[in-house]
Image: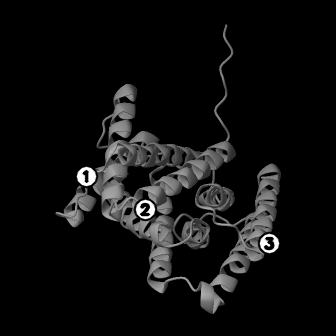
């Protein structure tokens, strides 16, 4: 009798999600540099995700609209608004800084998960969050306080709004986990994002050339990788633990920012990255002591 392959642990899904989202932001930044509006990038991402999600649902024989449609629509709308803010920040800030600001959402997520879901914040998870926030401070404060490296505040506010929206979306995903299949949860995001982004885009649509079209396609593909990994990780682990693992996206973004955009990390960036890695190790200890 053939041996059945066990499912991947939540940690691996969280890491896969982090890599997928990091590659997605690289493609977003490259696409924006080709004069494609942010809302058009959102729409393109939603279109690709919608097709892939629908094919996935068809292959599973699921009812695409699900049963808890109010929560599903709320998850789609909140995620759409957060995505618009995040994409704007990615296109107007250096990749590392944009990712760092957006990654304030684990703090909001842990608090919301405690308040709405009754999840206990474990000791090692708390240490992980504190170390990671210290790392974020080390990487951001020198840049924000330096006159010649000041970040545009509108972009900073957009990134923070995206972080808040992401936290709310994660909580909604967690509430839906166990009630709806992960594929149905994922489907509602592009199902809402596509019409909303097209409506707001209006007549500002820009016809992309072939290389730009390829980048837009990759935005959707890497998004799907990130969404699937995140949703499966949330189904198998507490929300505050999953978002703590996902801090690794910051390290991916620093590396990709250097390789693709020649954005050389400063000393404070390296110090902050080290603190974030240390926090991830504490979170692993929490998992093993469960």
Residue underneath mark 1: 207
* Percent x, y of residue 253: 62, 59
**Which of label 2 and label 3 is nearer to you?**
2
Q: Would you say residue 190 is visible in this rendering? A: yes
Identify the element where label 1 is drawn.
Answer: loop
Q: Residue at x 57, y 54 (%)?
A: 22
Q: Residue at x 42, y 69 (%)?
A: 88
Q: Residue at x 75, y 66 (%)?
A: 273
| Up/down of 282 relative to 17, above or below | below
* Percent x, y of residue 204: 21, 64
Q: Crowdedness of circle 3 by 10 Å Cα count: few (<14), some, many (20+)?
A: some
Q: Which mark is residue 165?
A: none
Label pair 1/3, CB-CB below 8 angstroms: no
Which residue occupies the foreground of this view, 83 or 255?
A: 255
**Which of label 1 and label 3 is nearer to you?**
1
Quarter of the image where the N terminus is located: top right
Q: Which of the marked residues, 2 or 3, is nearer the chain's N terminus? A: 2
**Alpha-carbon span between mark 2 and mark 1:** 14 Å
Q: Residue at x 62, y 49 (%)?
A: 14
Q: Which mark is residue 33?
A: 2
Q: Give the left or right position of residue 103, taking residue 220 as reference.
A: right
Q: Would you say residue 181 is visible in this rendering? A: no
**Alpha-carbon span between mark 1 and mark 3:** 42 Å
């Amino acid at each position: 009798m053939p041996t059945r392959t066990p499912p991947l642990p939540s940690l691996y899904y969280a890491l896969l999600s982090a890599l997928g989202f990091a590659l997605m932001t690289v493609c977003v930044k490259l696409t924006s540099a080709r004069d494609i509006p942010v809302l058009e990038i959102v729409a393109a991402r939603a279109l690709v995700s919608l097709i892939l999600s629908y094919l996935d649902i068809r292959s599973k024989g699921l009812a695409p609209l699900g049963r808890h449609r109010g929560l599903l629509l709320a998850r789609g709308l909140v995620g759409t608004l957060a995505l618009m803010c995040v994409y704007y920040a990615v296109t107007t800030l250096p990749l590392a800084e944009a990712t760092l600001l957006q990654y304030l959402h684990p703090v909001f997520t842990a608090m919301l998960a405690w308040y709405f879901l009754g999840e206990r914040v474990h000791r090692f998870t708390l240490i992980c969050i504190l170390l990671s926030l210290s790392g974020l401070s080390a990487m951001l404060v020198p840049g924000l306080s330096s006159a010649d490296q000041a970040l545009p505040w509108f972009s900073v506010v957009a990134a923070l709004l995206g972080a808040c929206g992401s936290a709310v979306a994660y909580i909604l995903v967690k509430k839906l986990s166990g009630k709806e299949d992960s594929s149905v949860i994922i489907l509602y995001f592009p199902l809402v994002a596509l019409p909303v982004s097209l409506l707001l885009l209006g007549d500002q649509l820009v016809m992309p050339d072939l290389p730009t079209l390829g980048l837009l396609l990759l935005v959707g593909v890497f998004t799907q990788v990130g969404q699937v990994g995140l949703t499966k990780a949330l189904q198998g682990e507490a929300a505050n633990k999953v978002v703590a693992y996902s801090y690794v996206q910051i390290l991916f973004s620093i590396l990709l920012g250097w390789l693709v955009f020649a954005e050389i990390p400063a000393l404070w960036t390296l110090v902050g990255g080290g603190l974030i890695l240390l926090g991830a190790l504490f979170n692993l200890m929490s998992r093993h002591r469960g």
